[in-house]
Amino acid sequence: MQAQHLIDRFEEFAPLNYREAGDPTGFQIGSRHAEIHKVLVR
């Protein structure tokens, strides 16, 4: 799965227009086209 696909799924659940001012939202590092195999959520 590409990172962009996961980002799209997260944004379906929590659209960016719901963010609060100062929230560190969106893609932070790396390439949106990179293949991902695992996700760490805390």
Image (cartoon, rainbow, N blue to C red):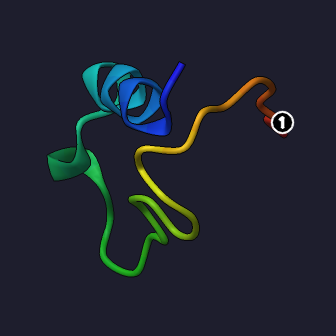
Question: Residue at the spot x=47%, y=26% of the render?
Answer: 6
**Which residue is situated farthest in the left direction here?**
17
Q: Is residue 30 left or right of residue 13?
A: right
Q: Residue furthest bottom?
A: 22
Question: What residue would you read off at disc 1?
Answer: 40
Decide which of 31, 16 is in the foreground and name it. Answer: 31
Q: Quadrant of residue 5?
A: top left
Q: In the picture provided, is 31 more to the left or to the right than 16?
A: right
Residue 36 figure quarter: top right
Q: Position of residue 41 (x, y in %)?
A: 79, 35
In this picture, is 12 found above or below 3? above
Where 30 falls versus 40 (above or below)? below
Q: Number of numbered discs present?
A: 1
- At horizontal 15% and vertical 49% (from top left) the residue drawn is 17
| Residue nearer the viewer, 41 or 21 | 41
In the image, residue 22 above or below residue 37: below
10 Å neighbourhood of mark 1: few (<14), some, or many (≥20)?
A: few
The structure residue drawn at horizontal position 57% and vertical position 64%, both measured from the top left corner, is 30
The C terminus, quarter of image: top right
Q: Quadrant of the N terminus?
A: top right
Q: Amino acid at mark 1?
A: Leu
Q: Residue at x 37, y 20 (%)?
A: 9
- Percent x, y of residue 16: 23, 48
x then y, percent, for residue 33:
42, 44
Q: Secondary structure at mark 1?
A: loop
Residue 21 percent coordinates (x, y): 30, 76
